[in-house]
């Protein structure tokens, strides 16, 4: 029996996948609000818009399951309409229309005006930087470019996001000012590839110039870099990190592997020697930089020797932050023509070995922080703790600083100086210096 639909004409935006998807959802919600539409993020509404991820197997499975969940709600009369957008929809639209026909409409990653039209709204070109942020009020993501021109063999992102397209520095500074006005203190710069920024617009890499422009925005106190590409890294960025107090001594640079045969097959455009040289330059120019990287294990043809090379390198490099993924065999990528010859069990075992090694490294590095003082940004209160981060930590993926809320009171969204009194693998425990 059909139940009565609640929350009439309220649009519920559901986001899956990475921070770049979250940013897109926030822009969509900003456009809907400007059209006087009632919109919520992952709340209750009679119209659902699912912003999907299509990057690797697990993400695709989660997206499909979420679509099916909302289709069932529609069939049960709990909601009226289901729209699907984002990467999965861009990549597999004909298949999805055939397999899950009860979705009202599917849209790709560049279909925002058409999606808005289907929702009874107009696309407003004049809304530069207008969006509804879903993160804690003290930080926000700032997408500086869309798409990717890199030829990595394993990656399907160019299929879903198209060619690299930088946003003008002027637009980004306007957006940053609006965010600062709303209480944002930390900007997290995101793109498929930050280091390519400006090549299409200005005919040269201009990430350093963009950073200098953003440093001038009043109210912004931290600027953090995510997703830099190692090949062709603009070294002038390191000078900006070193000399500008607002730019965090932090970089997220997904290196993926270090064995030369694997790097060559991955079409990364670099070698072990070049990568190590770049990392040495990072450490020499910015002596206390926290480097986050991600690795892929189980890539086609990865031998025990390749894996041992990777493992020894992780041990030697002692990255402050590291994540590890198992290889996902993605159709229409260059690597899809290779035999996916590393068994799933071996892939998982290798990923576990890397993460166990990193856990020990992280524990050792964290022990060195006991007794030291750090400036922390307080993100939230969770259970009995206020949860903050140092400049060396990004939200959701890195260490957190936990402060006993039964003993100390802190204001969420504020900076506070904290002394570290205890440390675990991925958490620090601290006490505020003034309270």
Image (spheres, rainbow, N blue to C red):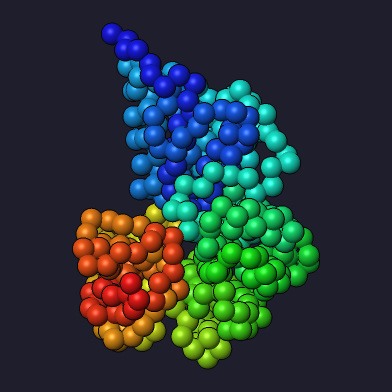
Asked if residue 53 lies left or right of residue 418, the reply is: right
Give the residue drawn at x 30%, y 64%: 409
Location of residue 355 in the rendering, given as x and y in whole percent from the top left corner: 28, 70
Screen quadrant of the N terminus: top left
Q: Nearer the viewer, residue 418 or 286?
A: 418
Residue 152 shows up from this direction: no
Quadrant assignment, res 66: top left
Quadrant assignment, res 383: bottom left
Q: Residue furthest bottom?
A: 284
Q: Nearer the viewer, residue 83 or 108?
A: 83
Where 319 falls versus 66 (above or below)?
A: below
Screen quadrant of the C terminus: bottom left
Residue 45 shows up from this direction: yes
Q: Nearer the viewer, residue 390 or 241?
A: 390
Quadrant assignment, res 79: top left
Where 9 falls versus 142 (above or below)?
A: above
Asked if residue 292 lies left or right of residue 148, the reply is: left
Give the residue drawn at x 23%, y 74%: 424
Location of residue 204 in the rendering, given as x and y in whole percent from the top left corner: 75, 70
Where 107 falls versus 317 (above or below)?
A: above
Q: Residue furthest top?
A: 1
Location of residue 326 in the rendering, given as x and y in whole percent from the top left corner: 35, 60
Give the residue drawn at x 69%, y 47%: 128
């Amino acid at each position: 029996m059909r139940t009565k639909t609640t929350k009439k004409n309220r649009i519920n935006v559901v986001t899956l996948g990475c921070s770049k998807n979250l940013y897109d959802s926030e822009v969509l919600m900003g456009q809907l609000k400007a059209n006087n539409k009632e919109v919520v993020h992952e709340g209750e509404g009679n119209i659902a818009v699912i912003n999907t991820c299509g990057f690797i197997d697990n993400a695709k499975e989660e997206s499909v399951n979420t679509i099916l969940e909302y289709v069932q709600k529609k069939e049960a009369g709990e909601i009226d309409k289901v729209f699907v957008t984002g990467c999965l929809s861009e990549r597999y639209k004909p298949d999805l229309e055939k397999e899950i026909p009860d979705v009202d409409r599917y849209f790709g990653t560049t279909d925002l005006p058409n999606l808005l039209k289907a929702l009874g709204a107009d696309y407003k070109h004049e809304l530069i930087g207008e969006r509804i942020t879903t993160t804690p009020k003290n930080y926000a993501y700032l997408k500086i470019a869309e798409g990717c021109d890199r030829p990595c063999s394993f990656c399907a992102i160019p299929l879903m996001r198209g060619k690299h397209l930088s946003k003008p520095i002027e637009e980004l500074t306007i957006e940053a000012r609006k965010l600062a006005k709303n209480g944002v203190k930390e900007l997290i710069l995101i793109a498929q590839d930050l280091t390519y920024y400006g090549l299409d617009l200005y005919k040269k890499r201009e990430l350093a110039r963009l950073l200098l422009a953003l440093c001038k925005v009043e109210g912004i106190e931290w600027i953090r870099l995510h997703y830099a590409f190692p090949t062709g890294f603009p070294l002038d960025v390191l000078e900006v990190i070193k000399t500008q107090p607002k730019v965090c001594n932090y970089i997220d640079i997904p290196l993926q592997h270090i064995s030369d045969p694997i790097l060559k097959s991955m079409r990364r455009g670099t070698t072990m020697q070049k990568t190590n040289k770049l990392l040495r330059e990072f450490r020499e120019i910015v002596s206390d930089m926290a480097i986050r990287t991600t690795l892929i294990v189980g890539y086609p043809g990865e031998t025990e020797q390749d894996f041992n090379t990777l493992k020894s390198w992780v041990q030697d490099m002692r990255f402050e932050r590291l994540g590890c993924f198992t290889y996902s065999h993605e159709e229409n990528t260059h690597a899809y023509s290779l035999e996916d010859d590393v068994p799933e069990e071996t892939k998982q075992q290798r990923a576990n070995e890397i993460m166990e090694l990193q856990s020990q490294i992280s524990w050792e590095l964290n022990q060195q922080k006991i007794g030291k003082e750090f400036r922390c940004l307080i993100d939230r209160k969770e259970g009995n703790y206020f949860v903050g981060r140092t400049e060396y930590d990004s939200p959701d993926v890195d260490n957190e600083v936990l402060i006993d809320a039964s003993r100390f009171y802190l204001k969420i969204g504020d900076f506070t100086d904290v002394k570290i009194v205890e440390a675990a693998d991925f958490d620090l425990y601290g006490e505020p210096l003034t309270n």
